[in-house]
Amino acid sequence: MHKINEDLQKERDKCSFNIQDLITLIDGGPEKTRERKDRENVMLSKREVFDGVPEEYLSHKERYENAIRNSVVAFSLVRKMQEEGKTSINNYRDVVGGLLGSSVLRDGSPLGLHYIMFMPAILNQGNEEQQEKWLPRAWNCSIIGSYAQTELGHGTFIRGLETTATYDAATKQFVLHSPTLTAYKWWPGGLGQTANYCIVVAQLYTKGQCHGIHSFIIQVRDEETHMPLPGIKIGEIGAKLGLNAVNNGFLGFDNFRIPRTNMLMKHAQVLEDGTYVKSRHSKLNYGAMVFVRVVIVFDMVNYLSKAVTIATRFSAVRRQCQLKAGETECQILDYVTQQHKLFVSIAAAHAFRITANNLWLTFNEVNEQLSEGNLQRLPELHALACCLKAVTTADTAACVERCRLACGGHGYMMSSSLPLTYGLVTAACTYEGENTVLLLQTARFLVKTYQQLDSKALTPTVAYFKSAAAEKFCDSWTNTTEGIIRGLQVVAMRKIAHCVIVMTNRVSKGMTFEDAWNMTSVQLVAAAEAHCRVIIMSTFLEEVKEMSRTISPKLKEVLHQLAELYCIYWALEKLSDLLLYTPISQKEVESLRLWYEETLTKLRPNAVGLVDAFDLRDEMLQSTLGSYDGRVYERLMEEAMKSPLNAEPEVESLRLWYEETLTKLRPNAVGLVDAFDLRDEMLQSTLGSYDGRVYERLMEEAMKSPLNAEPVNHTFHKYLKPFMQGKL
Amino acid sequence: MHKINEDLQKERDKCSFNIQDLITLIDGGPEKTRERKDRENVMLSKREVFDGVPEEYLSHKERYENAIRNSVVAFSLVRKMQEEGKTSINNYRDVVGGLLGSSVLRDGSPLGLHYIMFMPAILNQGNEEQQEKWLPRAWNCSIIGSYAQTELGHGTFIRGLETTATYDAATKQFVLHSPTLTAYKWWPGGLGQTANYCIVVAQLYTKGQCHGIHSFIIQVRDEETHMPLPGIKIGEIGAKLGLNAVNNGFLGFDNFRIPRTNMLMKHAQVLEDGTYVKSRHSKLNYGAMVFVRVVIVFDMVNYLSKAVTIATRFSAVRRQCQLKAGETECQILDYVTQQHKLFVSIAAAHAFRITANNLWLTFNEVNEQLSEGNLQRLPELHALACCLKAVTTADTAACVERCRLACGGHGYMMSSSLPLTYGLVTAACTYEGENTVLLLQTARFLVKTYQQLDSKALTPTVAYFKSAAAEKFCDSWTNTTEGIIRGLQVVAMRKIAHCVIVMTNRVSKGMTFEDAWNMTSVQLVAAAEAHCRVIIMSTFLEEVKEMSRTISPKLKEVLHQLAELYCIYWALEKLSDLLLYTPISQKEVESLRLWYEETLTKLRPNAVGLVDAFDLRDEMLQSTLGSYDGRVYERLMEEAMKSPLNAEPEVESLRLWYEETLTKLRPNAVGLVDAFDLRDEMLQSTLGSYDGRVYERLMEEAMKSPLNAEPVNHTFHKYLKPFMQGKL
């Protein structure tokens, strides 16, 4: 253990609340905290396996091989937990979510989709025999699956998919085919070189008729040799902004045949003679989409907590410029512009977590009703999941990037972990429903709701439409968070109402409804966003009020400050809406600004305590700037020394000098141990290992050699296959 | 040449103006267009040298070696142009700027700083003897330099730099020293393994007194062996979000001695006996800072044009969803939300270019006055350069990212070129003055100006303060761009005024001025931004009006539409300011929104023509999504096939299939040539070369082998040294 940076220690000393209390609250109780820590301990027990030359110095291919190695180790542990009954398909969210983006699987995993999409698809869309046949093999990873829907030319518009699955009654087989280049599947995680099975979404043809898209389970590689099966054209799609460990693949079919029973038939079926039996409920698949979106919101909470922990700790350690001439340089956390950049992210992490928990509960309720055939609440749930996914991913991307920029140049270093985090988060703005498209889906629901305002009972998330229509603003309504939320409810309702008026006008002037919708779509997106912010903010506030009854007064105070900050921040961000649609005065606006600035000041002394409460271990953060002990500059230099460019012999002298510098800086035992730590890392990449891990290192090096290029990527035989056979 | 995508061809056919006219206008005349094209032809004449496995598949070290190879080829051509009198230090901006971020030097260059900072520093800060001694060697690259100011612990606050240069009169030497870890220089481009000289900024001590920071020219590596000199601790700082070809380095000194004459002495001097002679004008160095910021704004124009060209062409090729049921899927460029995401970037590229040209002229004027000792206009120029750098980099980063997200998943592919572009642009938000810090500098100038409003004549960029104070809004003022700008001038002035009031209040309640400034800094930043937007918008509008007298009516029309779009866009973005500080009504806001939507519709048919007019050759764009011919999907697949993961023997069968698919898709000769193209790329990385470039490829492969690790990175001996000796 290193000595804690003095500035950071002072921050912790002045924290007004008990950090452990907040940790427990965030986890959802002491039991949950214990479970999480247990999981982390298990995962990090194999930590030394994951150390080595930092990913960013490796080639694309080496990164893939690394990812396979790390994934196999990590998911062996998951399998072990599974066998010991410590996890089930119901808390994969925690387990897999905790792994991805952590130090263990920093840039995603080729096995992620196996857990997140492949198994759930069989569970949700397969009939009983199919579940019995495939799930046990998938559970113990003796097959590895992916999920292929998107095509090179088709994403959002699922009905436009080109891949066909044509039933041949003579052989009782489906013939899968990719008629064009744009029909190639494109993006599925793990599909490139990793998976041997895949759920494929294709247009179903039988008896000469197209019945739209259905799912099929398809073997793509030989289970023994891992060679692609004849008729399968498969490979990886290449380098991306992030997620480069995911091995996203493409997949084309050349009249590839599968048995009839490989169509997932829980809902619709094709009988042996080719008769198509329709699904009872065409909307049942919405459940899976909603599930994935809930998972994404939880992911965002993880990434946002991570980014703001890094940036806040760094801002307490970093000193730059003088607030007053002649003083020592001040912690950059003391600059109000810096507080403005960071504190809203702390608040947002809480707001999103609370809203996601809420969405998760609603999802489970509605899912139960669905299984009973009750579809009533599905449209609302769908609209809610759409906008929450869109707003939380967009906000998180913006917040993470703001945190990164708030760390100045050092935030641009890969070793800060912030660029990687942004890469993971910004991807979520696009996958599983592009954000603009999703907000327009929510807008469609809101417009419909508004048009039926008088004739229909309103579902919970839009109940405010009626109260907002009747809102009478009292004096000083802007002085409370409740008032602000009522104001923003009026805004959301009025924005929808305004869109309806604009569209009606356009239609009355001869436009088609579709063109009027398109012309008004920029405003519709803004209206859906406004609605979503109302939901997040009011859920956050209500929950904080609810919590207040059981938590310490000190903790209550700081949580209230966070909720206030979040409300005022967004009121000021969306000020033009308040000015347009509520009777807010210029004076009230000025008071809001002062209130905002004062809340920043109140939160300042607790900033480090608040991010400590996210309880992200250094091994999860993996950041030179964000570690618990605040050894920012030392870590930056240590990481720089790991660059292979610095490992040439000429650097020998540099290394000695560096050690001298370290020795001077740390005239105590801890400092000396530091210096030895460094030496091991540096030697590893050129001079060979002195730490006794000779054979492991020899093997790792051997694995990188082009001489070992095997007909099939060797990682399959070394790692994947034994893993799949349960020998690991 | 491939056939042009049909949709793209249709777009070009319907373009209402002559694209060549706009190209000429952008370049600044037919002569300039010719010069630019000549330069491009020279640079791209060596294009085949730059082809190979895409950068994103290489390891960090291989990328560096690639960067050295490409830089040496590119800058040899620059040197040749130099010798032929086709370029001078005055248009390095065009030459070096055109190279960086292009296909030639995609992710920066280790030699960039040599041209952009090292030589200008000697020119601006060296006395005549020093210029005579160093410049010719730098000009012909027999020495390679970098520029080291920022330290591990010190960036913004230059006065806080820790590196010391202590004069020793006995030996007539300066002793350079890094007393702590945080004193290490950190970031200088090319300093890691490339440069052998460096300008170093350090605290000057002589006769026991500190005289603040001064610049020194320091040899860091042996000119012959390239080994670091004794006392020099040097290396690279590691992987970053972007700019990974730049070889950013660190540098520490252990009592390293240099001759007295290596202090750059144009301004201040240290005499032989150690007497310090003060600089005549302490502010003279501002000139260099302003220069670099002007260069950055031009860079932003390049990157923004590039990103929006890619996204717009892709949006014309990509079809997704039906606007009306039953229709064919429509071009995504037809969605108004997509137009909203893209068109403002086209307008911004023009607005920034025009403003940068203007700033460049002002800079040259003021620089001339400076050399005559007239410093009067320096504060205004400094304030202007600060806010323009901040706003254009932040806007460009946001616009590039919006363009990338507007391309959906495909924008996440490295092969789209958009992630790399974002990496380059977002770095500019931090380097050469962090954006928040710069805006606060502008705010300080604006506050001072406002406080002296009655007593002083106003300089040009703030002249509007007085007219704004007297502004009487007529009816329907929001119906014209001139009206909007007047509105935004009132906004900027009132925001500054409001900050002054808030600060005065705070001081009157007992706060120090510094604390009041800090508490108000979020609002001060917003005020400076508002001022900057007024400058950009009014410069853009005036220039378009000015141009209108000489250009065709069709071109005039579309440029006016762009200027309108830009004004309305920002009026709507900053609507809360207009609502607070001007008498804009709800009805007028609604009209603005309609005007915005209508302007998007007017621009829609010219979108592709407008980005064509940026005249960025495919070789400069290097994007699968943005090429002139629109072969988006084919290129995506071709690039995917270049991934080393797809080059394993198992893919042999895939390759044959892929060629079959291509053959089916392109039943003509051109298609067949495509297919052969692909084969070469694929073979290259595993099976060896069939195209006859056997020896080149053998050498390239040899260069990658760890067996060739030399005491000094071998690229020095192979490329850098011959280049520096003028043999290349």
Image (spheres, coloured by chain):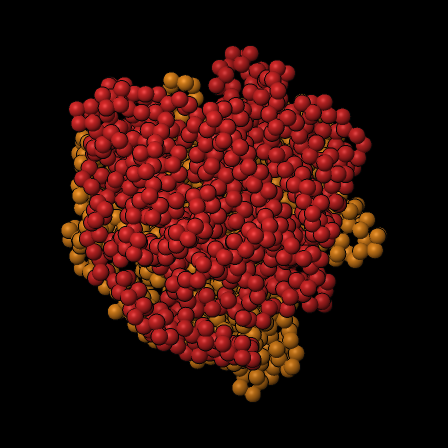
Chain colours: A red, B orange
Q: Residue furthest front?
A: A84
Which residue is more in the foreground, A184 or B72?
A184
Q: How far across and how far down the image is residue A718, in percent? A: 26, 58
Which residue is more in the foreground, B199 or A671?
A671
Question: Is residue B264 visible in the rendered structure shown here?
Answer: no
Q: Is residue B706 left or right of residue A558?
A: left
Question: In which quadrant of the rendered view does residue A359 lie?
Answer: top right
Q: How far across and how far down the image is residue B275, in percent? A: 63, 80
Q: Which residue is located at x 33 percent, y 43 percent?
A: A136
Q: Residue furthest bottom?
A: B170
Q: Is residue A435 above or below residue A548?
A: above
The C terminus of chain A lies in which quarter of the figure?
A: bottom left
Q: Which residue is located at x 36 percent, y 29 percent?
A: A266
Q: How far across and how far down the image is residue B198, in percent? A: 47, 69
Which residue is more in the foreground, B83 or A418?
A418
Q: Is residue B281 left or right of residue A688?
A: right
Question: In which quadrant of the rendered view does residue A234 lie?
Answer: top left
